[in-house]
Image (spheres, grey):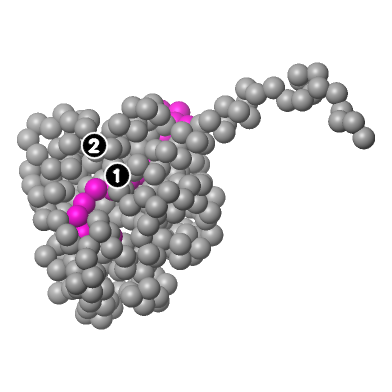
Amino acid sequence: MRCSVMFTSSGRWRWSCSYSPSATRRIGRASDGRLAAINVLARHYDVATEVVDVGVDHEFVAAHGLRDCKVRRGTANFARGPAMTTAEALRSVECGIQLTREAAATNLFLLGAGDMGIGNTTSAAAIICAMTGTAPSDIVGRGTGVDDETLARKIAAVENGLRINSPDPNDPLDVLAKVGGFEIGAIAGVILAAATFRLPMVLDGFISGAAALLAHRFSPHIRDVLFASHLSAEKGHRLLLDELHLDPLLDLSMRLGEGTGACLAMGLIEASVKLSREMATFSSAGVKARLS
C-alpha cells in the first residue's frame, strides 16, 4: 500500500486562511521528519508514504524523503486572476501521472493520495462550485477552523474568483488553471493513472475529492477504481461525494488531510480482504445447516 502526499502554497492565504504560508513549510518538514499525523498512521498500517513538493513557496535543501516536483513557488491569488497558467496546470497533472506510473511497476495492492497546504480547501471549494454550479455559500467550509469573519472572506474570495476567471465547467484543465492548486492537479493525475493501470485508489477527503471531480470530467471511468475513505467535516463534502456517486467508508468528522483518512481506510480495506481470503466459512469449519 502506498500514499503520496502532495503539498503546495496558496496565493489566497491572506484573505481566507487562519494560518500563514509558513505553516505549509513547517508541516512539510514535520512529515519529512516522520512526525506528521500521516507518518504515525502509515507506520501503524504499514503504508509507504512519499511527500511531494508540487508548489511550496520555499526551497527545501537536501530534504530526505521529499520529492521535488515543483511546478513553481506557489499559485497566484485566484480572486484577482488565474491561479496558474494552463501549461502549469498540465504539469501538475503530469506529475501525478508519473508518480502512479512508477508505483504501478511495484505490484501495488492499494494506492492513496493526500494533501498539505494552507488555503487548499478554498481551491477545492472553488473547483466544486465551478464544476457543479453550486453557490459558494453552500460549499465553502471552515477548513482549519476559521471564524465567522474569515469564513465570510473565504466565501467572497471564491465568488470573486469564479466571477473574474469564468472557468469552463466542461474543461477540467481550465477549471484547475483558473481556481485550482498544484496539489489538486497532481492528485487528479494520480487518479487518472490509477484508472489506467486498474489500481484501486483510495481518496482522502475534501481536497482529493475535488481532484476526483476534475479527473471524472477527464474520464468518467475513473470511478470504477475509487474508494471514498471518509466523510469529512467540510460543508460541501457530502455534495461532492454524491456527484461522484461514492459512499464514504468512515464518518469521523475528520478535517486534517495529509492522507490520514485514506490511510485509515486502507487498513480497513486490507483487513476486509484478509477476512475474505483467510477466515473460515461455516462450510469449511464443518458447521451444519441451521435448525429449522
Which residue is labeled 2 in the image?
36
Task: Indicate yes or no whether the magenta region holds residue 132.
Answer: no
C-beta proximity under 8 Å, tags 2 and 1: yes
**Which one is in front, 164 or 238?**
238
Residue 255 located left or right of residue 270? left
Report the front residue among 10 and 141. Answer: 141
The stretch of residues the image draws in magenta is: 104-121
- Left or right? Give the position of 17 relative to 264: left
Residue 237 occupies which quadrant of the picture?
A: bottom left
- Label 2, secondary structure: give it: loop
Identify the residue at image location x=33%, y=52%.
255
In which quadrant of the rendered view does residue 14 lie? bottom left
| Residue placed under numbered mark 1 in the picture | 258
**For residue 64, which quarter of the picture?**
top left
Residue 161: percent from left, percent from top: 23, 74
Q: Answer yes or no: is residue 96 visible.
A: no
Residue at coordinates 23% horizontally, 70% vertically from top-left? 148
**Of the residues shown, which amino acid type is indicated by label 2?**
Ala
Which residue is painted at 26% across and 77% down in the image? 159
Which numbered disc, 2 or 1, marks the residue that appears first in the sequence?
2
**Image quadrant in which the N terminus is located:** top left
Left or right of residue 71: residue 289: right
